[in-house]
Image (cartoon, helix red, strand yellow):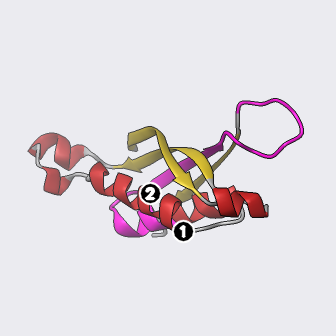
Amino acid sequence: MKDKVRLQNMTFYGYHGVYEHEKQHGQRFCLDVELAADFATPAESDNLTDAIDYTQVYAQIKDIVENKRFNLLEALAGHIAETLLSAHPIMAVTVRVRKPGSPLPGALDYVEIELTREAQP
């Protein structure tokens, strides 16, 4: 059984994209992250040291989105997933990245990619 914690609709300003204007001017990115782990111990202990500190998770995501640069949303999401897997006692992570200002020749709310990664045994 996997328990989950979700951070929904985090919004940051970053400089990701293939086109030069995206790299120079930047834009908003919205993210959801779902962390799967066993919460039996923190549920019993009520102690933060036994739990996933999602203030740290948020800070790590913010740092990546705002201070690193990627051409592809897939690369951004993959880097976030690998960072979280290596830094926290989680079994799996799902990352969704939305790009409201995608340079497509038509009307749409956003482009979204989703990827899931699991911890290696």
Place residue 30 in its image quadrant: top right
Q: Are marks 2 and 1 in contact (CB under 8 Å)?
A: no
Q: Residue at x 18, y 40 (%)?
A: 43
User: Compared with residue 33, is residue 22 higher up or lower down, i.e. above or below?
Assistant: below
What element does badge 2 sit on? Answer: helix
Q: Nearer the viewer, mark 2 or mark 1?
A: 1
User: Quick check: is 90 in the magenta stretch?
Assistant: yes
Task: Provide residue 12's location: percent of width, then percent of height.
Answer: 50, 48
Q: Which numbered dot is residue 52? A: none
What element does badge 1 sit on? Answer: loop
Q: In the image, which residues are magenta? A: 82-109
Q: Residue at x 78, y 30 (%)?
A: 108
Q: Residue at x 38, y 57 (%)?
A: 90
Q: How many circles with numbers are drawn on the protein?
A: 2
Q: Amino acid at mark 2?
A: Ile
Q: Is residue 74 visible?
A: no
Place residue 72 in its image quadrant: bottom right
Mark 1 crowdedness (10 Å alpha carbons): few <14, some 14-19, many ≥20: few
User: Compared with residue 36, is residue 59 higher up or lower down, i.e. above or below?
Assistant: below
Indicate which disc, 2 or 1, sits on the residue closer to the N terminus: 2
Question: Residue furthest toward the right?
Answer: 105
Mark 1 = which residue? 68
Q: Amino acid at mark 1?
A: Lys
Mark 2 = which residue? 61
Is 11 on the left-hand or right-hand side of 105?
Answer: left
Q: Residue at x 58, y 47 (%)?
A: 29
Mark 2 crowdedness (10 Å alpha carbons): few <14, some 14-19, many ≥20: many
Task: Provide residue 5's location: percent of width, then percent of height.
Answer: 37, 41
